[in-house]
Image (spheres, coloured by chain):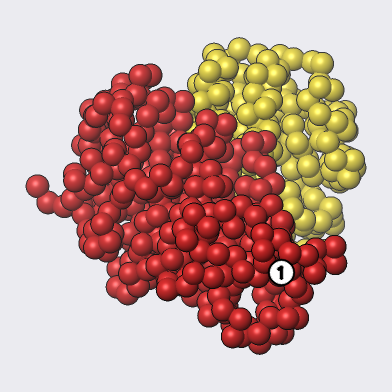
């Protein structure tokens, strides 16, 4: 059990069974572990997602962890998404958190790497994973997004920030926002 | 024209691939009153165009050109144009944390007794970084206080050059940069130490050191292991080994034998070997006996620890303490 805490302008992370408040949308998370919103990259991704119009969008959440970004995306109006994580425990945790938030068929869960994702044409890609992995997956990841689609990349250590921006620009994206945090950074891009 | 709070000195050649990232990391510094003195040492790629673009939009970027003449020549050329008493070094392929200048500037301002301050460093990108580099990174970052840096001064170069900030007058007092056929940075640190200047490290990761196959450290003869040994022997002769012509080496391996050659060329004979390998104890190698550590006494004369194996240094230090030997007086670690 943990104390509820606010994240972004409109969300509150709460344990199951917490009474709702009127001014914030609750995201129920099984426990307040890493990836439940305390980390600066998660919080920053949610800050940025709140500024976007996600209504009706489809998304891919690569490195989905606890599923918090996917849950926020759905609560911000996204239609449906695909959560992918290489860790079995992470997939299990994301499934549980979806159940706690009464999310069912809107989210599909897969355990593995980007290679498992044969679909493309997503409106939005969320990838809160390390910068060096983003660099390695750049072209494959961009190929998953439809033209005009959005990529929200985070988990990028400072030293990789420039290289990530540069490589994704070379892959046909435009940097819309680049936020440097304490240790990590977040980059928001639009595919041209 | 007034002097900025600090000058940043950079020398580049054919750095088009990473230069913009390095320059952008300077533009992101929270301390904004700096100048960059960058010397293009005869680049043949787009380096000059990149530098011009930055200089055109930001007058803090001061670019100088010279025909290709080498790193030391370019640093000396740039040095003449640095207007501040505090100089930060930087390379064209690395990244600074935005707080780097602010932290180092504040440190040197608050600690007038310190002449050079480094920061913790971190190699990147992960896929390129081999185990040895991580080990070097962790060793370097562990040396925070002046006494720790001095104790390990002959083990390896204790600072990543582009991560340091130093006082111009201190460096000038020991002759500035020079080319001796070994790393100009290590040469400078050793001269500063010999002259009694003081070092420190800010134990925060404020510098990101890019690893790539064409990095100068991997290519130039000045950074070969043999050049390092020659450099160390040169300075040991002026400090710990001053006035000595005979020495004991602990470690009868390849490293020890390579050290023997370098010392011999400097006029110093290895008269005694120490080893723990039963197969080597009792042998005579190059006219010098091999004995166990237990035969050591404080009056045995100077001894260099030349064991190449990772992790052995700490074991040797513990054994020496057990034997009543004092580091810096009875022995010095050179590997």
Name the residue at 22% across, 33% down: B64
Q: Is residue B130 visible?
A: yes
| Chain coloured yellow here | A
Quadrant position of residue A16: bottom right
Q: Is residue B168 visible?
A: no
Q: Is residue B111 above or below residue B19?
A: below
Q: Nearer the viewer, residue A20 or A122?
A: A122
Q: Is residue B215 above or below residue A167?
A: below
Pinpoint the chain carrying mark 1. B
| Chain coloured red here | B
Name the residue at 30% across, 50% down: B177
SS assignment at label 1: strand
Quadrant position of residue B199: bottom left
Residue denoted by label 1: B289
Please state, as top left, top right, bottom left or bottom right, where the N terminus of chain A lies in the image.
bottom right
Q: Nearer the viewer, residue B20 or B37?
A: B37
Left or right: B85 with respect to B253? left
Q: Position of residue B117 (x, y in %)?
A: 40, 62
């Amino acid at each position: 059990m943990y104390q509820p805490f606010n994240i972004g302008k409109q969300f509150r992370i709460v344990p199951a069974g917490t009474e709702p408040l009127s001014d914030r949308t609750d995201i129920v998370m099984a426990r307040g572990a890493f990836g439940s919103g305390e980390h600066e990259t998660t919080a920053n991704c949610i800050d940025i997602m709140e500024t976007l119009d996600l209504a009706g969008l489809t998304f891919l959440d690569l490195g989905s962890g606890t599923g918090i970004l996917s849950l926020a995306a759905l609560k911000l109006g996204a239609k449906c998404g695909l959560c992918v994580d290489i860790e079995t425990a992470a997939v299990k945790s994301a499934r549980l958190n979806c159940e706690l938030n009464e999310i069912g068929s809107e989210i599909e869960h897969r355990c593995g790497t980007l290679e498992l994702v044969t679909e493309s044409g997503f409106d939005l890609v969320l990838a809160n994973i390390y910068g060096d992995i983003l660099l390695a997956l750049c072209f494959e990841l961009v190929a998953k997004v439809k033209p005009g689609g959005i990529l929200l990349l985070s988990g990028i250590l400072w030293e990789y920030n420039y290289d990530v921006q540069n490589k994704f620009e070379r892959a046909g994206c435009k940097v819309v926002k680049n936020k440097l945090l304490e240790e990590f950074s977040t980059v928001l891009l639009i595919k041209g | 024209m007034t002097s900025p709070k600090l000058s940043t000195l950079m020398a580049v050649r054919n750095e088009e691939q990473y230069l913009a990232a390095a320059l952008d990391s300077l533009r992101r510094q929270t301390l904004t009153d700096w100048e960059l003195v960058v010397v293009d040492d005869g680049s043949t790629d787009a380096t000059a165009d990149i530098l011009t673009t930055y200089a055109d939009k930001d007058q803090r970027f001061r670019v100088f050109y010279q025909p290709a003449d080498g790193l030391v020549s370019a640093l000396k050329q740039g040095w003449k144009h640095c207007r501040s008493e505090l100089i930060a070094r930087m390379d064209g392929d690395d990244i600074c944390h935005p707080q780097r200048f602010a932290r180092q500037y504040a440190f040197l301002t608050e600690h007038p007794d310190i002449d050079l301050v480094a920061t913790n460093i971190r190699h990147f990108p992960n896929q390129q970084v081999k185990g040895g580099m991580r080990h070097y990174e962790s060793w370097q970052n562990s040396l925070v206080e002046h006494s720790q840096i001095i104790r390990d001064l002959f083990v390896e170069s204790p600072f990543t050059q582009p991560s340091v900030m130093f006082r111009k007058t201190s460096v000038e007092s020991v002759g500035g940069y020079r080319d001796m056929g070994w790393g100009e940075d290590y040469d400078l640190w050793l001269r500063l130490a010999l002259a009694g200047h003081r070092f420190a490290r800010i134990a925060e990761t404020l510098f990101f050191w890019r690893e790539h196959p064409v990095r100068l450290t991997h290519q130039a003869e000045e950074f070969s292991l043999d050049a390092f040994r020659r450099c160390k022997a040169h300075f040991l002769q002026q400090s710990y080994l001053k006035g000595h012509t005979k020495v004991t080496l602990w470690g009868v391996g390849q490293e020890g034998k390579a050290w023997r050659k370098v010392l011999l060329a400097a006029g110093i004979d290895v008269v005694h070997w120490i080893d723990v390998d039963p197969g080597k104890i009792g042998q005579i190698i190059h006219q010098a006996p091999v004995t166990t550590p237990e035969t050591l006494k404080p009056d045995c004369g100077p001894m260099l620890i030349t064991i190449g194996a990772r992790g052995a240094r700490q074991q040797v230090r513990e054994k020496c303490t057990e034997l009543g030997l004092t580091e810096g007086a009875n022995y010095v670690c050179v590997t």
